[in-house]
Image: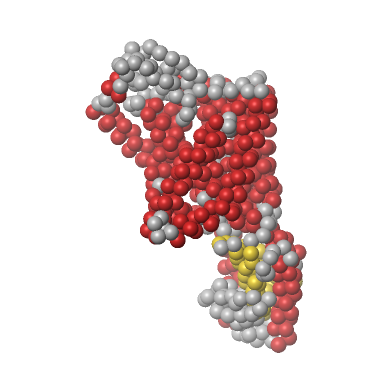
Amino acid sequence: VSNSQTPTRGHLATMGHGNGSGASDGSFSDLDLFDHPKLPHNNDVSLHTHAAPTFDDVIQTLLYVVILWVAGKLAMGLKMPALVGEVLVGMVMGPGLLNLIPHPSAVMLWGEVGLMLLVVEAGLDVDLQMLRVIGARGVGVAVSGSVLPMGIGYGLASSLGLNWQAALAVGCALAPTSMGIALDVLKKAKVLNTPTGQLIIAAAVLDDVIALVLLAMLQAIGRGTSMVMLLIPLGSSFALMGLAVAMAAYVMPKLTKRIIASPTFGGHRAEKTLLVLLMGLAAIFVPLCHHLGSSHLLGAFLAGLCLCTEPKLHHAWTKQVKRLLQWLLRLFFSATVGFEIPVTSFSDGEVIAHAALFSIAIVGKLATGLWAVPCTITDMLTVGFAMSAWGEFAFIVATTSLEMEMLDEATFASLTLSVLFSVFVSPLLLRANLSRAAKASRKRIEEKQGGDRAHGAKGAHESAEAAVLYHMLFKSPVAWGQSVKLLAAVRANSLQVLDFRSAHGDHCVEHELYVEDTKLTAPLQRTLTPEKETQVQYRIGELLQALAHPLASHVKGGVSCTIERWLPAAEADKPSCGDAGGGAGGGAGGGAGGGGG
């Protein structure tokens, strides 16, 4: 392909292999990773029929890669996702505008490889235990966050006069959420292990699954199959997902345990053996999904899903594949996505107007905030803004629809412009909301610390009282919807949550809470009068009964619960907690009384 051509994937879908003069010796309608045109069967065809890269090709490619890296870093410096800068580089330097990239189809091919690895990683990142802890709310956020914007997008596209296939493609492109963008903002704000953070991540994982199913449906529709043939890829997608979940939960943990313990494949070879097993599963699931009429990307996701419970593989992936994946994803966003975008169309007022219209579908994403627990304004906005960033899968669905000629270039340009808008705006809004919430929380704690210290300076004889604060630690086996049940029990017992963190591992989950009691007050001092000490201890006993017992009824194996009075002005403001059956009164956190059960 020469630089004078415009070899985007939509263009390549109508070309045959060139014979050096620009003529075509064959045509094909659907170019993807598996449907390639056949080379002519004659003795003249060899590797030497393709021109070798020139010195200028090498220099231009190197320059492109350097600019790509710099653009991503500049975007991050401006508090935007790196993919914004990478897509812009592809739009400007690619075939759509300056056409400075030699052999763009080869760069796009490597972008496709990066896409495959990205989807494998998405499968690996599935946390089955966290999905159980979050429960139905995670499913509700994912389903409503996909169905609502898809329905709104379908309606908006239909109002523009698009046929039902094009309108459906627009709706499906506006359904996915960018897990990577949300994860980055939540991680930097240190709220990943809060109920809201875990709800968002669980929903984003399920959102990816829905996006892959929608992609499979679009590909089946694009092939013009009948309704019966449409049900085959959908049915096979759900069946294979069920198989992968069963393998992840019951089969693969036993197999990986044997591999790690094996003298031949274990030891220092264990991580490489697990990576080979992962790629072997991908080699099975990817063509299987493709030939069943589903999306080959679903097969890549299922391969990762099968081994999502093995921590050694996660470590091996981070050490061996992660850095390569980062570079390949730069090529994906810049070439596979950026080269496709018709930049010159952005000067068309109609394209911009349609992009603004499609952006209305973001309302369906913002509505997912109603699932937040606790349902405060801050948590509702956090969930809504986190789910409102369209990203990787939105670009995948849009470019696939363009290749299958379900979308024209003008509609595709409007769609990608609205996606880029959400990628730019949503993280800024999410970051601002989390920053505001963090400042309010710090101010509240500092006020309590200031009151505590001020009272200590006045002396213990002062009788001024304040709401009693508690530090709570719950440890139990994983159960469905556990965090939601615990939060409901906390609110029902007149407690206000100041901070809530969760962690899990080895089939066990641990919840740590700092709460304020709205029913009981006590002097801000370590040593209480016998009467007040009795009241605090009695209240702690009440809370143990009210909080631990409902949780214990939903799990097998019992619940370990520790509750202590918490004085935030103490130097060690996080008291150590005892096991089930033991309290830790007067611990390092300045607890004046404690209880365990």
Instruction: Look at the image and name its color scheme.
Output: secondary structure
Please say whether residue 57 is visible from this viewpoint.
Answer: yes
Which residue is located at x 39 percent, y 19 percent? 39
Between 375 and 508, the one lying in front of the other is 508
Which residue is located at x 54 percent, y 32 percent? 290
Between 345 and 126, the one lying in front of the other is 126
Extreme-left residue of the structure: 55
Residue 341 in picture, x, y percent from top left: 48, 27
> Is residue 49 toward the left or the right of residue 220 in the image?
left
Reply above or below: 310 against 177.
Answer: below
Tally of marks: 0
Image quadrant occupied by the C terminus: bottom right
Residue 363 in picture, x, y percent from top left: 65, 38
Which residue is located at x 54 percent, y 56 percent? 253
Between 205 and 554, the one lying in front of the other is 554
Between 294 and 42, the one lying in front of the other is 42
Reply above or below: 70 against 193.
Answer: above
Quarter residue 269 falls in: bottom left
Image quadrant occupied by the N terminus: top left
Please say whether residue 427 is visible from this viewpoint.
Answer: no
Residue 377 in picture, x, y percent from top left: 67, 52
Quarter residue 288 falls in: top right
Which residue is located at x 51 percent, y 46 percent? 304
Residue 70 in picture, x, y percent from top left: 36, 40
